[in-house]
Amino acid sequence: MDFTATLQAAWAKNDSLLCVGLDPDPSKFPAALRGRDDAAFEFCRAIVDATAGLVCAFKPQIAYFAAQRAEDQLEALIRHIHDKHPGIPVILDAKRGDIGSTAEQYAREAFERYDADALTVNPYMGFDSVAPYLAHKGRGVIILCRTSNPGGSDLQFLDTGGESGIKRLYQHVAELVATKWNASGQCALVVGATFPAELAEVRRIAGDMPLLVPGIGAQGGDIAATVSAGRTAAGTGLMINSSRAILYASSGEDFADAARRAAQETRDAINQFRR
């Protein structure tokens, strides 16, 4: 089953638009895990097992593992998700953005080494920087469009002089992906919850394409505005990501149970505004 189909099935099975980001920060681990060689894996595994029935996707951020020299633990974590929680897609958040043979190697890393179902990609270098990932049929390619950080406006909000309301650079990216780059149906877009008006505009341009939406929780994005702006007519279409608010709901030994409670509260809050 390919990424898009797996995601659609997860939306339905778990009645959820929630994506849990897996950003393991050793300084925030409970005391029992600190200093362990497998701490990143064990922390994330506990979070995954506690929340898997409440989510539509998991999103490990590669930098948190690489900085700890824990890439082997990332591989083990993705295997664990696939083995123990089949049907929940894994998005590798790496924001790759190169071309040619280098991009081909990044694609192999994401889809062959890590066996991720989807990867985040930076489109700044144009279609050349996206095509090598699309060559891996069935894998999702999630393209940065209107990101949640304030500095994103430095480039993404530039006026391109386009026609038919497509003037800002982020709008141009959304239109390119929706009309030209997504011929295989593998693409999705990243749009931040911190900009609900632009989220609604991307939804208008991109139709029912899936949108990965960071920015709720610790970054302050409003759930009601996010769902209203980004949902499809069917009440789906979104992977609304929350990381720190769920991962670090407790610093004690009950961290996994606290994460489950936070995930359930977030999923239920999202569902209030879906239909």
Image (cartoon, grey):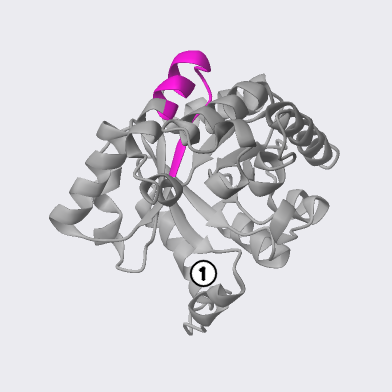
Quarter of the image that includes the N terminus: top left
- 31 left or right, relative to 99: right
- 195 left or right, relative to 208: right
> Is 81 within the magenta?
yes
In the image, 32 versus 88, the foreground residue is 32
Q: What are the residue bounds of the magenta stretch?
A: 77-92
- Can residue 116 be seen in the rendering of this structure? no
Image location (x, y in percent) of residue 211: 57, 48
Kind of residue at badge 1: Tyr
**Circle 1 residue:** 170
In the image, 252 versus 106, the foreground residue is 252
Q: Residue at x 71, y 56 (%)?
A: 218
Q: Residue at x 71, y 33 (%)?
A: 259
Image location (x, y in percent) of residue 37: 41, 33
Q: Residue at x 30, y 54 (%)?
A: 130
> Is 230 within the magenta?
no
In the image, 190 versus 94, the foreground residue is 94
- 211 left or right, relative to 79: right
Image location (x, y in percent) of residue 137: 29, 34
